[in-house]
């Protein structure tokens, strides 16, 4: 009788471990690789930003940022600032915008970037 309780306890621990691992895998809690702009063409990189609306891209081994398609993907307190990144074919490719806390100089005339 006691042996069956021990076996049941071990089975429950295994089950909870399996459930926990499954939950981690399905929620994307593990670090996901960011697309590297220098491994794509300018067109591919811009299409990725445009298609996603907002995406985190690596621009080098230790550099990355969040790029957005338009002001609509920034917080209400943020402003869209034009962003250029290095790509495989162009050293400075316009891919969209980054969201910044301060209004960019080009927008201070009252014109919002879309």
Image: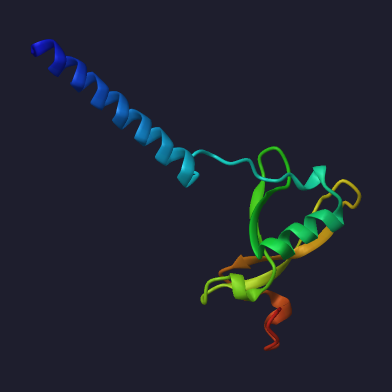
**Where is residue 69 shown, x and y percent of the image?**
70, 68
Where on the picture, by quarter, is residue 20?
Answer: top left
Looking at the picture, does residue 64 appear above or below residue 61? below
Residue 34 can be seen, yes or no: yes
Q: How is the image coloured?
A: rainbow
Q: Is residue 40 left or right of residue 101?
A: right
At x 19% / y 21%, what residue is drawn?
8
- Between residues 73 and 80, which one lies in front from this camera angle? 73
As drawn, the residue found furthest toward the bottom would be: 110
Give the mark count: 0
Image quadrant for the C terminus? bottom right
Q: Is residue 30 left or right of residue 39?
A: left
**Where is residue 3 shown, x and y percent of the image?**
13, 11
As drawn, the residue found furthest toward the left would be: 1
**Where is residue 104 shown, x and y percent of the image?**
67, 74
**Where is residue 84 shown, x and y percent of the image?**
78, 60
- Between residues 16 and 111, which one lies in front from this camera angle? 16
Q: Is residue 27 left or right of residue 65?
A: left
Where on the picture, by quarter, is residue 9?
Answer: top left
Q: Is residue 32 left or right of residue 40?
A: left
As drawn, the residue found furthest toward the right would be: 89
Looking at the picture, does residue 98 appear above or below residue 44? below
Image quadrant for the N terminus? top left
Looking at the picture, does residue 19 appear above or below residue 91? above
- Between residues 32 and 68, which one lies in front from this camera angle? 32
Residue 92 can be seen, yes or no: no
At x 31% / y 24%, what residue is drawn?
14
Where on the picture, by quarter, is residue 39?
Answer: top right
At x 85% / y 55%, what residue is drawn?
42
- Between residues 26 and 64, which one lies in front from this camera angle? 26
């Amino acid at each position: 009788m006691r042996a069956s309780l021990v076996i049941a306890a071990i089975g429950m621990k295994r089950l909870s471990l399996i459930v926990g691992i499954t939950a981690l895998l399905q929620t994307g809690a593990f670090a996901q690789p960011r697309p590297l702009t220098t491994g794509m063409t300018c067109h591919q990189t811009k299409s990725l930003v445009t298609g996603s609306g907002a995406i985190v891209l690596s621009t080098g081994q230790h550099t990355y940022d969040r790029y957005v398609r338009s002001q609509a993907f920034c917080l209400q307190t943020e402003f869209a600032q034009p962003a250029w990144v290095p790509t495989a074919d162009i050293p400075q490719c316009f891919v969209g915008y980054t969201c910044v806390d301060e209004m960019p100089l080009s927008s201070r005339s009252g014109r919002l970037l879309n």
